[in-house]
Amino acid sequence: MNCLCMYMYLFNMFCCLDAQPTESEKEIYNQVNVVLKDAEGILEDLQSYRGAGHEIREAIQHPNDEKLQEKAWGAVVPLVGKLKKFYEFSQRLGKLSLLGALTSTPYSPTQHLEREQALAKQFAEILHFTLRFDELKMTNPAIQNDFSYYRRTLSRMRINNVPVEGENEVNNELANRMSLFYAEATPMLKTLSDATTKFVSENKNLPIENTTDCLSTMASVCRVMLETPEYRSRFTNEDTVSFCLRVMVGVIILYDHVHPVGAFAKTSKIDMKGCIKVLKDQPPNSVEGLLNALRYTTKHLNDETTSKQIKSMLQ
């Protein structure tokens, strides 16, 4: 497949909502589909997450008012139930095995993307969800405030031997893991990066280039589709643009985590200057979260091998 055909093919892949799996893809496709079906609901719950800031402030300002303490606790407990659901979803996402199907020998990344169209689309959808989740989380300080208050109150209740309703929902061990998860600037992306790194380390018989070439190919396709007027004009709505931008940033970050020298080195197969320029050419408020993901979630940005120009572009 030549370059032009590949870009047009993958343009259709990104825009086609009903890519059907072949027989060989079905088992993995169905496993991933079960998880992806819940992704939209997770985003809706996160988008509508308002927090218990008012109740918490009232309780802190009036520590001896039992009614206000009960009111704050009653407001926080169901919210922590939501946070638990988000965290458990991240664990499901981290266990998916799509990369194995998209990087196995003897096919090249382009051949895989051509052969496993449905799985490639699912991988793109996972990246889109991941970046969207982290954008929403990054702009919602209520999440960490609520969880911190929950943990402090739980600890105080234990010290005072107060019966804790709902502790089975989030026990101490789970609370510790959730705390580490939400402490990350981009927790869902961290989960995906860790899963990708683990995949590479556990499959040493698979050349690392199979994985990094798959990721760099997807980054290249997204960049070219976004920066080339001929392709860009075929996008029927801005949602497709946002989708491609998130997929591009997602694969860059995964590449940077698994490639020995990362995405920013001169030897990288990703045109980082071109990708950053594509992001900078969008309305600023629509891509700030994605630029922050590159600034704070990548592994090699601050390496000496990263050019001053790239560092300057991301400042």
Image (cartoon, grey):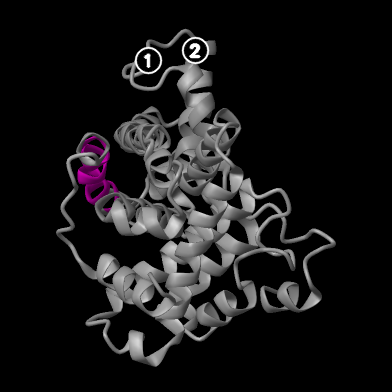
Vertical placement of residue 232 versus 114, above or below: below
Q: What is the C-alpha distance between the residues marked 2 and 1?
A: 8 Å
Q: Which residue is mark 1?
A: 164
Would you say the residues marked 2 and 1 are in contact, meaning their CB atoms lie under 8 Å apart?
Answer: yes
Type of amino acid at the residue the image marks with label 2: Arg
- Asked if the magenta segment contains residue 187, the reply would be no
- Considering every residue shown, the one lying at the far top of the view is 161
Vertical placement of residue 168 versus 304, above or below: above
Foreground of the two, 125 or 101: 101
| Helix, strand or loop status at disc 1 | loop
What span is in magenta? 30-43
Foreground of the two, 244 or 221: 221
Query: Which mark is first along the chain, 1 or 2?
Result: 2
Q: Quadrant of residue 300?
A: bottom right
Q: Position of residue 20 (x, y in %)?
A: 15, 52
At horizontal 53% and vertical 61% (from top left) the residue drawn is: 216
Left or right of 311 in this view: 245? left
Q: Which residue is mark 2?
A: 158
Type of amino acid at the residue the image marks with label 1: Val
Q: Position of residue 153 (x, y in %)?
A: 48, 26
Q: Is residue 63 visible?
A: no
